[in-house]
Image (cartoon, rainbow, N blue to C red):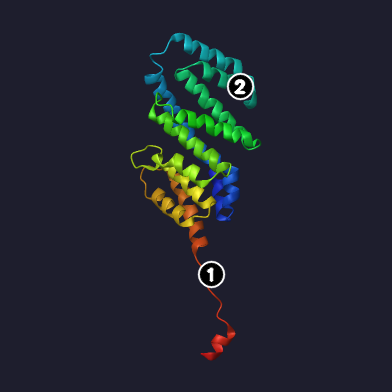
Amino acid sequence: MSDIFDEVSAELRRDNMGAAWSKYGRYVIGAAVAIVLLVATVIIGSNYVRGLEEAASQRYDALLESLAELDTQEKIAPLEAFAAAEDNGYGALAQFTAALAHAEQSQTNSASAGAAVAGFDGLATNSSLPDSLRDLAKLQAAIVLLDSQAGLETIEMRLEDLLDDDNGLQPMARETMALAYMSYDKPLKARELFKAQIGDARVTSLTRERASIMLESLSGALTPPVANIPAASKAKK
């Protein structure tokens, strides 16, 4: 993982921010999201799924076994069918996994991006799920939208609540929103978010380093060039 961050830093220092995001962005943020996903799964396992029937657990285990040898595209339909049939925590996990699979396919299939966002949005609006999983779905939807160059307002809408100070996903949401502002030519807004990221004691050193590199690149882009004084003007003086 450290090699990825080193390559990201090199790309950004060469002012290839767009290329760096296209190549590494989803993995940089996704690495941190994977940790939160693990936590959310534990929360579901300990609180939400505890009261469900043992039969649902057995059906989910059987599903995972049947998918073990399939590639990503082939897993989507069985996962979505399971999610539609199971009105419980295991169905929600299947829906989340299917949406992630769509997101993975979205680089080569534009329709997959829409399917991924629809899946994450469905989870985000499911009031029976824990807030941690619903917020994570909003973040993932925003990442897919950013990666597919959707409208800025659609990204802002999904990240709005996650940017609150009391939300545990704020650092990742802030980074995603800042990258979106950069992509949509709003460097001043991006700069403010990167400054907030650097000053946040909760973020990791790698996250703070990325924010510093981005802020440095933005500062250079925002500095106006020194105008050349015409020779005639100099002569008059």
Q: Position of residue 134 (x, y in %)?
A: 43, 30
Q: Where is residue 86 in the image (x, y as percent from the top left)?
A: 49, 16
Any part of residue 3 in sight: no
Which is nearer the eye, 204 or 181? 181
Residue at x 64% of width, y 19% of height: 69
| SS assignment at label 2 | helix
Marks 2 and 1, Cα distance to the nearest angstrom? 54 Å
Which is nearer the eye, 212 or 153? 153
Residue furthest toward the top? 55
Q: Where is residue 62 in the image (x, y as percent from the top left)?
A: 55, 12
> Tag 1: residue type?
Pro
Q: Is residue 49 above or below residue 228?
A: above
Q: Residue 225 carries which label?
A: 1
The quadrant of the rendering that contains the N terminus is top right
Residue furthest toward the right? 108
Q: In the drawing, does residue 172 fall left or right of residue 69?
A: left
Name the quadrant containing residue 233: bottom right
Q: In this view, does 199 lie above or below 237?
A: above
Residue at x 54% of width, y 29% of height: 99
Which is nearer the eye, 2 or 120? 120
Name the quadrant containing residue 101: top right
Which is nearer the eye, 152 or 47? 152
> Tag 2: residue type?
Ala
Q: Which mark is residue 72?
A: none
Give the mark toward the camera: 2 or 1: 2
- Residue at which label 2 appears: 77
Mark 1 surroundings: few (<14), some (14-19) or many (≥20) residues within 10 A: few
